Image: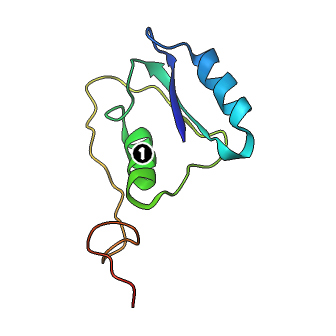
Amino acid sequence: MLRAEMHDPATGYNWAVSTAQQLGRAGRLFTYEGWGHRIYDHGPCAVNGIDRYLVSLELTAPGTRCPAIPPTQSKTSTYKPLPGPIPGLPGWVRS
């Protein structure tokens, strides 16, 4: 999953779009419509999309865009993973 900020001063958004196109179906572009070089703490849309991917490898829907938010809003995640060990992570044992 590629994540990109539309107004990132370090890496241009057009580069992320190009990379996603080159990856084809194997790539997914997750866009934050605001400023910055990272998106994790930029609102629930960004936090929950990233949490879902990192915890369960669940990709965002194609073309997912998160709106820009004021920098004062909280970075609290509302994502709740399923209880129990996750296959492939420490603690998981095949039955």
Quick one: quadrant of the N terminus? Answer: top right
The amino acid on which the numbered mark 1 sits, given as a three-letter code, is Ile
Image location (x, y in percent) of residue 37: 39, 19
Judge left or right: residue 37 versus residue 27.
Answer: left
Residue occupying the point 25% across, 37% down: 74
Residue occupying the point 61% across, 18% down: 15
92 vs 68: above or below: below
In the rendered image, the residue lying farthest to the top is 9
Q: Can see residue 34? A: yes
The front one of 78 and 31 is 31
Tell me the quarter of the picture where residue 79 sits. bottom left
Residue occupying the point 26% across, 45% down: 76
The front one of 37 and 75 is 37
Binning the other alpha carbons within 10 Å of mark 1 as few (below 14), some (14 to 19) or many (20 upward) gives many
Q: Can see residue 66? A: no
Which structural element holds mark 1? helix
Image location (x, y in percent) of residue 56: 43, 61
In the rendered image, the residue lying farthest to the bottom is 95
Please tell me how many numbered marks the rendered image carries: 1
5 vs 12: above or below: below
Image location (x, y in percent) of residue 89: 33, 66
State the colouring used for the structure image.
rainbow
The front one of 34 and 73 is 34
The residue that disc 1 covers is 50
Residue occupying the point 39% across, 17% down: 36
Quick one: quadrant of the C terminus? Answer: bottom left
89 vs 25: above or below: below
Image location (x, y in percent) of residue 49: 46, 47
